[in-house]
Amino acid sequence: MTILGAVASRTRVVIVGGGVLGTMHAVAARRRGFEVVQLEREAEARGASVRNFGLVWVSGRQAGPELALALRARELWEGLGAEVPGLGFRAAGSLTLAAGDAELALLKEAAARPDADQRGFELLDPAAVREVNPALRGEFAGGLHCRLDGIVEPRQALPALRRYLAGDGYEWHPGREVAEIAPNAVRDHTGAWHQGDLVILCPGAAHTGVAGRYLAGAVRRVRLQMMQTAPLAGRITTALADGDSLRYYPAYDLAARAQLPPQAQAAARACAQLLLVQRADGGLTIGDTHEYAEPFAFDVDEDAYDHLRDRAEALLGGPIPRIQRRWAGVYSEVSPDAAHALYYRAEAEPGVVLVTGPGGRGMTCSPAIAEETFG
Ligand SMILES: Cc1cc2nc3c(=O)[nH]c(=O)nc-3n(C[C@H](O)[C@H](O)[C@H](O)COP(=O)(O)OP(=O)(O)OC[C@H]3O[C@@H](n4cnc5c(N)ncnc54)[C@H](O)[C@@H]3O)c2cc1C
């Protein structure tokens, strides 16, 4: 599909969805000089884009198109971060920490990947890990430093981008739920039609809404549990991941993975990995778990939280501050049988393009996905 050809001589773009995908499409469209009208059903975005870690995560991506997309996105985030300080972009890097020899062997293998330099990988012994991140006073066998991983502030990023776009040529309409799609147009719940030379639907995990009939079978939903602590006095200089993350990310699908011991029961039950990011205000965002079978739980599971808190405290070597917030989030990802696709994009109706399903890479890749939509 040649979206660029479709819009080259056109000027008005209607975007449905106020999450990061919709908003990055708004940025990309404005940069091309198009007028943008953006509709969001809630008063403010409340989906995956404000519930995530804000990790711009290059380290674990699969070699090839996924890594290329993440690297391009990382470049775009950094550029935007310089123009929009409210994103809170920081090139903090990450440390993935090995608890024992088996995880360390896998980190060594990852550090020897042919694309290790592209990812900014370096294997560190415990003393070198503490030089990079002195807050890590706990026990670990070594760490993989990924200099390219970055952090943004998910609770601030979308309003910050909208302030950046504000002015002639950009309209933001919260509280408008799109209920009907027609060629080059959508109708919202008040009955108002919004006509565009191009309409871009970014409904996130709303798979049964107005986009549902186009998405059937192409995407699935995944639910994650998260928490956030009160501010920690010290600085945690990098994002952190524990060895369980090596089980999930494709970059670590290497020979030594087969030698990993079984996961702790609570982690295995919840498909958990520890990811930890210090927020700009000092709080720690800690997650995550993965639930794939619907109906999803409507409540949060304390066993998973106990496990994640214990893992964080083991790495930091002391108690973390009081948990102030717990939440769950749901993202949309392409179905496992189309797992070669990094996200879903298709023309739903003439002049209406549907983009969703980036999965756990959506915050990272959103600026590059938007760029690809416009060609
Ligand atoms: C807990 C959690 C942690 C994650 N951590 C990371 C991370 O650290 N790094 C990373 O790269 N990715 C991460 N992800 C994935 C990432 O957050 C998502 O892939 C990304 O936010 C998806 O963005 P989106 O705009 O498609 O969806 P959303 O953020 O869900 O936005 C979709 C928006 O569309 C609106 N909408 C839906 N239907 C309509 C309609 N009919 N009319 C009007 N508006 C509508 C919704 O209200 C919503 O605001 C995480 C996800 C979760 C849940």
Image (cartoon, grey):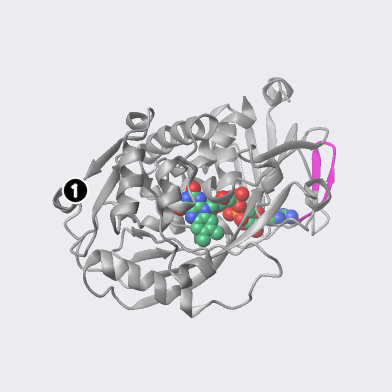
Please indicate, yes or no, whether residue 174 appears anywhere in the rendered image. Answer: no
Q: Can residue 291 be found in the magenta stretch?
A: no
Q: Which residues are magenta?
A: 178-186
Q: Quadrant of the N terminus?
A: top right
* 127 lies above or below 80: below
Q: Residue furthest front?
A: 259
Answer left or right for 316 relative to 176. Answer: left
User: Is residue 186 shown above or below 275?
Assistant: above
Q: Report whether residue 136 is seen.
A: yes
Q: Amino acid at mark 1?
A: Asp
Residue in the picture at 29% in, 57% down: 100
Is residue 181 magenta-colored? yes
Whether residue 90 sits left or right of residue 325 in the image: it is: left
Q: How many marks?
A: 1
In-front residue for pair 325/288: 288
Judge by depth and name the residue closer to the eye, 120 or 248: 248
* In this view, 248 is above or below 366: below
Residue at image point 32% right, 73% down: 230
Q: How far across and down, in percent of the image, does residue 16 sit?
A: 69, 47
- Main structural element of the magenta stretch: helix, strand or loop? strand
Provide the secondary structure element on which disc 1 rests.
loop
Residue 87 picture location, percent across and down: 40, 48
Q: What residue appears at the point 48 percent right and 30 percent down from the top-left corner? A: 68
Question: How would you rate the neighbour count of disc 1 (Cα within 10 Å): few for under 14, some for 14-19, many for 20 or more?
Answer: some
In the image, residue 115 lies at what x, y percent? 38, 29
Locate the C terminus and report the quarter of the image it occupies. Answer: top right
Q: Position of residue 59 (x, y in %)?
A: 40, 42
Answer with the quadrant where ligand 1 appears in the image.
Answer: bottom right
| Label 1 CB less than 8 angstroms from ligand 1 | no
Q: Which residue is mark 1?
A: 125
